[in-house]
Amino acid sequence: MALKSSHYFAQGNTAHGAHFLYKSAFDGLNKIFVLTGPQGTGKSTVIQSLADSLLDKGLHVQCFHSPLRPEELDGIILTELKVGVVDGQVCKGISDIGACEIIYIHFGEAFDNSLILPEHNITIEDLRGKLERTYSKTYETFATALRIHDEWEKIYIENMDFSKADQIAQDLIQELFADHESDSPTAPRHLFFGAATPRGAFDFIQSLTAQLERRIFIKGRAGSGKSTLLKKLASAAETKGIEVQVFHCGFDPNSLDMLIFPRLGTAIFDSTAPHEYFPDQDGDEILDMYAWTIAPGTDEAHATEIAGIKARYSAKMKEATSHLTEAEAIDSKIKAYYVAATNFSIVENLQLQLQSELNELIGSIQLSK
C-alpha cells in the first residue's frame, strides 16, 4: 500500500550552524506558494490545514517539519501536482529555484502593526537578541561535540581495513545497481530524515522506509566507514542514472546517514544511536561495518579512552539540546506578540483563497487523466 504522506526535515540546527536543503528538496516543482509575513500570523497552521485537506482528497503530501517544533510544518509538496507551499520566513533557498513559478501570499495583511506598542517593540528586539545569542551557543556547543566525535572516530579509523571497506562498497554497487543503469546521470535529492530539536534527536526513518521491499541497517562505531560507504553508493547512483534520495546527518550535514532508491524499493541507512533500529520485517538485513572492517579487539583495547570520549560527547549534546529548549521558549515569547496582533479572520480568507487555487489545480489534473 502506497504511503499517503512522507515526512522530512529540510533544515537543521547542526554543528555547522543552521543548514538548509530546501533548494534541493523543492527542485523540479512547477509552482511554489510562498507565505510571507511575521511569525505568529498563522502560516504553519494554514499549511497543516491544507495538508490535512489534501490528504482527505487522497493526494500524496510531502510534509516538511520544523526543527524547532517538529509537530509543526514549515512546508508541504503536493506530489501529483508538483506544487509546494512554504513558510517564506523559514524556508531559505526557495527563491533560488529556477524554472519554477513563485507566487507570494502576504500573511502580513492580517497583522496590525499598530497593536504592537513601542514598549513591545523594545521587548521584542531584546528577545530577538537573546534568541540569536542562544542559537549561537547551540551551534558552538554542537561544534564542540563534533570535535569530540572526531576523537572517537580517530580510534576506529586507525584500526580500519580500508581495502575491505572499499570492497563492501563495490560489491553493493554491483548488487544494487546491476541491470538498473540509465544512459543519463541523475541529480540526487538532498533531505534530512531527522533533526536536533528541543526534545532531542527526532527522526522519520521508520515511516520513510517501512513500505520498502529491502532495508539495509548499517551497524558500526563512529569512524567505521558508514558515511563513506553511503557517499560512494550515492556517487555511483548519480553516475549510473539511478534515482536516489540522499539524507544528510542532522548533526553533521557533511556526513550522510541514509539513501533511498525509490525505484529499487531499497533503503540503506546508519542504524546507530541516536537513530538506532533493528530488523523487524521481511527484507531487512544488517551490515556490520565494525565486524567487517575494524581490527578485532579495538573496543576492548581502547575501552577507557572511549568511555571518557563518550561521556564528554553526551554531555555536550545534552547542553546543546538545553540551548535549543531555551531558543524555543524565547521564540514563543516573540511569537505571542504577533499572534495577539493578528486578525485571524483575514488569515482564514487567505487560506480559502489558497485552497481555491489548489482545488483548481487538482481539478485540472483530474480532467487530464
Image (cartoon, rainbow, N blue to C red):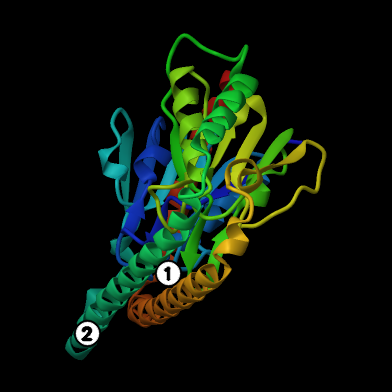
**Nearer the viewer's eye, disc 2 or disc 1?**
2
What amino acid does circle 1 point to? Phe
Q: Residues within 10 Å of mark 2 (few under 14, many from 20)?
A: few
What amino acid does circle 2 point to? Asp
For numbered disc 2, what is the local secondary structure? helix
Q: Is residue 301 above or below residue 337?
A: above
Q: Residues within 10 Å of mark 1 (few under 14, many from 20)?
A: some
Viewport quadrant of the N terminus: top right
Q: Is residue 345 above or below residue 87?
A: below
* Residue 352 percent across, percent down from the top left: 47, 52
What residue do we see at 55% from left, 57% from top? 49
What residue do we see at 42% from left, 17% from top? 185
- Residue on which disc 1 sits: 344
Viewport quadrant of the C terminus: top right
In this view, the residue in front, 334 or 277, is: 277
Which of the labelled discs sits on residue 126, or is there none? 2
What residue do we see at 38% from left, 38% from top? 24
Q: Sequence-wise, which precedes: disc 2 or disc 1?
A: 2
What residue do we see at 63% from left, 37% from top? 267
* Residue 284 percent across, percent down from the top left: 76, 40
Residue 14 appears in the picture as rendered: yes
Where residue 304 sits, quadrant-wise, is: bottom right
For numbered disc 1, what is the local secondary structure? helix
